[in-house]
Image (cartoon, coloured by chain):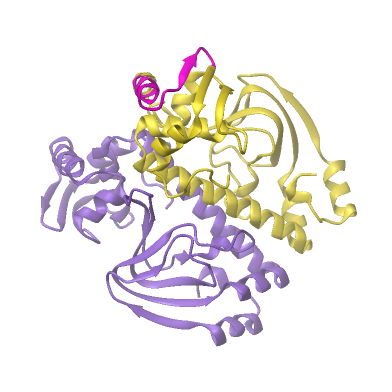
Chain colours: A purple, B yellow
Amino acid sequence: MHPLFRGVPAELVNKFIAQASPHGYPKGRIIFMQEDEAERFYLLVSGWVKLFRETLDGEEAVIDVVDGGHLLGESVIFENDTYHCGAEVVEDAALVSMPLSLLKEAVETSTVMAKNLFTAMSRAKRLQTKELEHRTIQNAPQRIGCFLLRLIPKNTEKNIVLHLPYDKTLMAARLGMKPETFSRALNRLRDETGIRIRGASVEIDDVKMLSDYSCSACSSAYPCEE
Amino acid sequence: MHPLFRGVPAELVNKFIAQASPHGYPKGRIIFMQEDEAERFYLLVSGWVKLFRETLDGEEAVIDVVDGGHLLGESVIFENDTYHCGAEVVEDAALVSMPLSLLKEAVETSTVMAKNLFTAMSRAKRLQTKELEHRTIQNAPQRIGCFLLRLIPKNTEKNIVLHLPYDKTLMAARLGMKPETFSRALNRLRDETGIRIRGASVEIDDVKMLSDYSCSACSSAYPCEE
């Protein structure tokens, strides 16, 4: 069960189930746009979704790229009821949407539900604060290193082969870089830490070399909690 | 009354008042450090406070610089109970601190209180998302322009004299820039928009020139809602 519903009375969970709609969306599908009126929130079951904002000039800022387990659009309740960013499927996604009005009602009537939503929002804010820190202090190769470190399974230290979860252009945008900066940074990261890149695969012989290089410019030591 | 307590039953507000401690802190005072165990949250009444994170290398990332009306440390309840960032007074500040345990209890027993805290957290997250957008897309002169535009009183369009709220080194850090980048960017902003800078004063003849220049690289048109 998703942490949002953990410990919530079955009767209330059933209300959500009764009003839930499943969606299977292909790559490229826009789920909602920034400033759209928010009527539903989404639980991403699988796949990858890009959260983005578009400037008046038409440039796009990627705020995050999220995978299974993430909630989308849940944080607008009790505010101005428009989505904070747009959401677009970047790898085929399965989602479940539920009415925000029900979520609003549920946190007003169930202490457990309110607590769960607070926990989710607090966590999301902490991650975003960390992201702000990274975009401010880490240089481009360190940011890529940090991204790769997060893909490594726990307690694995040697001889790892990672598959990049989505394409390098999006990876660059997710890290707040222009594609040409990303290419140069990836080369530098390779030279500094001995990783090898073959298409969408990355081979890492020694995690410590990578974490020493990347995490020195972060407020958390490796492995970080999330 | 602060929005957090708006509509809250007097009995509950009195509980907060009974356990509130006022603090008058001078510039330079650390209120709390990142990862400190969080026992109290703070309502900033006046002055300016810097929120920051420090990397293992000892470099500092300024996450935000906030003024009167802001809550500090309120978002850690229901999570791991350590502060997400450090907080340091940068212009003499008056604060009121209250126990987080009481806030936790209050949102569990009062729907209005829970709603108010959700609203505050949702707003904070939206502002942070916008900040991420800015650090990603706006160039340095545009970011300074955006900072100045936020200081302009509503419905004022011509012949404005602004006083910078804190020193330029901190302003640079707040905008995620190195001091030398900041100086160059300020000169460029002056050349592009006709503003004049005299010490801590900035003279703006025409707000539209400044907003045209800065807000084209933002997802909101001027004037923005916050």
Position of A150 with respect to A108 (left or right) is: left
Find residue B105 and report its horizontal and vertical position in percent: 76, 56
Residue drawn at x 45%, y 78% as measured from the top left: A96
- State whether residue A79 appears in this view: yes
Relative side of B100 to A170, left or right: right
Magenta stretch encompasses residue B195 = yes
Q: Who's the residue at 72% across and 54% down the image?
A: B104
Front residue (pair B224, A9): B224
Q: Residue furthest bottom?
A: A18
The answer to whether B18 is drawn above or below residue A16 in the figure is above
Q: Quadrant of the C terminus of chain B?
A: top right
Residue range corresponding to the magenta coloring: B184-200
Residue at the image position 68 percent from the left and 34 percent from the top: B68
Residue B52 visible in the picture: no
Q: Position of residue B195 (x, y in %)?
A: 45, 22
Quadrant containing the N terminus of chain B is top right
Tally the numbered discs.
0
What residue lies at 50% left-to-right and 12% top-to-bottom?
A: B198
